Image: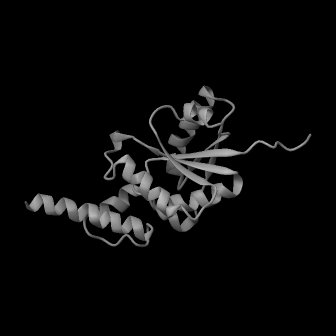
Amino acid sequence: MLPSLEKKIAIYPGTFDPITHGHIDVIARAVKLFDEVIILVAQNIAKNPIFDAEERIEIVTEVTKHISNVSVQKFDGLLVDFAKKYKATAIIRGLRAVSDFEFEFQMALFNRKLAPEIVTVFLMPNEKYTYLNSTVVREIAKFGGQVDHFVPPLVEQRLKAKFNQGSQSEKN
């Protein structure tokens, strides 16, 4: 059998509020496996993001611009519908620890039921990022802590600006 000439496209969905070195590590691993990786920035207002979707798209686009086979898009709706529309063959999910697995496994099974032709690929970031998550980064930044070990410089700047902006409006 001849190898498929079709482009292998994967999608990497997430809130990315903010994108961390752990996310970027997963992206770097994914681009080695797929011809194209589409990073999907979820609307997910239930998570009460500090950056709106447009800000997150701008930030993710900027910090991944050095990776040629990555694009960034916004989505709101069923992940498998987006995957079908863009002919993606895989959904990338990062697993930091065993505690992530149960939820991610359940979501993968739902997605498989809805679209059996799309596989979920679990990628683990470098072990130095296994403790890292956006919620903790936001919390540290909110209280003025150093986040430069966790996020790219642009993200650190945007977090500082976002929280300084909030404290200024509270003073007025």
How many numbered badges does the structure rendering display? 0
Q: Is residue 71 above or below residue 120?
A: below
In the rendered image, the vertical position of residue 1 relative to residue 166, given as above or below: above
- At x 59% / y 26%, what residue is drawn? 114
Q: How is the image coloured?
A: one colour
Above/below status of 23 relative to 116: below
Quadrant, the C terminus:
bottom left
Q: Quadrant of the N terminus?
A: top right
Q: Residue at x 43, y 48 (%)?
A: 15
Question: Which residue is the extreme one toward the left?
Answer: 172
On screen, residue 170 versus residue 102, left or right, reads left
**Image position, residue 56 (x, y; %):** 40, 53
- Residue 103 pos. (x, y %): 50, 41
152 shown above or below 8? below
Instruction: Name the residue at 63% across, 31% down.
Output: 112
Query: Of all residues shown, which one is farthest toward the right?
Result: 1
The residue sitting at 70% across, 54% down in the picture is 33
Q: Position of residue 75 (x, y in %)?
A: 47, 39
Q: Is residue 47 left or right of residue 66?
A: left
Residue 115 in the image, given as x and y percentages of width and height: 63, 29
Closest to the observer: 121 or 14?
A: 14
Residue nearest the observer in this picture, 138 or 100? 138
